[in-house]
Image: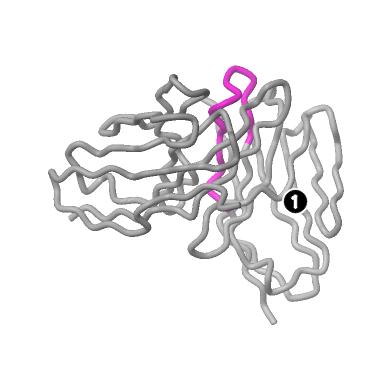
Amino acid sequence: GEDVEQSLFLSVREGDSSVINCTYTDSSSTYLYWYKQEPGAGLQLLTYIFSNMDMKQDQRLTVLLNKKDKHLSLRIADTQTGDSAIYFCAETPRDSNYQLIWGAGTKLIIKP
Amino acid sequence: NAGVTQTPKFQVLKTGQSMTLQCAQDMNHNSMYWYRQDPGMGLRLIYYSASEGTTDKGEVPNGYNVSRLNKREFSLRLESAAPSQTSVYFCASSEGPGSGANVLTFGAGSRLTVL
C-alpha cells in the first residue's frame, strides 16, 4: 500500500536553515501537506502543495516537490527556538481524498 | 472560535471498561475524523464521517465505534478497552476535499491509558 517516510529526528543550530525530507510511494497523489505539532498539542497545518507544482514559498517556509523521485521537502529559513516541534508530511492518495497517508513525523531539535 | 474541542484530555481505564471520547467543532465543517497517534507511527485513521449521517472505517477500526450525532459532534466509543488501545487520540474536522486540498483542523488530543 501507499507509504510516507520521514527521518525521526533533525538537529540544527538556531539561525541555520532546517530541511525536513519526506518520500512517498503513491505517484498519483494529488496534494501533499506539512503539519506541525508542538508538545502536548494537536497538529496544525503549515502549508500544502498541489502535485502539479514544484515549489511553494510562504515567508520562512519553502516546500519543494520532486515528483519524479517522489520526494517532498520543507525548508525553514532562520530556524528559531519556536520552531521546535514534530513535523508531519502527509499525502492525499488519488483513490481516497478523506484518508490521508501520514509519515511518522520528524522531531526538529534546535541547538543554541 | 474554539475550533475542535475534545473531551476528556486524559483518561485511565482498566481492561474491559468502556468509554466515549467526545468531539465538537464550531467551524461548520462537513467532515470529521478520529485518529490515534502512537510513538514512531504517525497518525492512523480510525473512522471518519464524510458528511452528517455517514461514517466509514479507516485504517484501524477494530475495537472502536463512532457516532456522528449531528454536524458539530462526532464521538468515538471503546466498548471493551484493551491495553493495545493505549494511545493519544485526535479528533479533526475539515470542509471536505471537494475539488481541492483537504485541510484538517485538529483538536488538542485525548491521552488514554488502558491498564
Is residue A97 within the magenta segment? yes
- Disc 1 target residue: A74
Instruction: Give the residues in magenta.
Output: A91-105
Q: Between residue A46 and residue A66, name the one nearer to us.
A: A46
Helix, strand or loop at label 1? It is: strand
Q: Magenta part mainly helix, strand or loop? A: loop
Q: Amino acid at mark 1?
A: Leu
Vertical side of B69 occupied by B108: above or below: below
Is residue B19 within the magenta segment? no
Mark 1 crowd level (few <14, some 14–19, many ≥20, 10 Å Cα): many
Vertical side of B59 occupied by A106: above or below: below
Which subunit holds the residue at mark 1? A
Display colour scheme: one colour
Residue in the image at 53% along x and 28% along y: A99
Residue in the image at 70% along x and 36% along y: A32
Q: Quadrant of the C terminus of chain B?
A: bottom left
Residue A61 in the figure: left or right of residue B5: right
Q: Between residue A40 and residue B70, name the one nearer to us.
A: B70
Specify the quadrant of the image occupied by residue B23. top left
Vertical side of B37 occupied by A4: above or below: above
Specify the quadrant of the image occupied by residue B74. top left
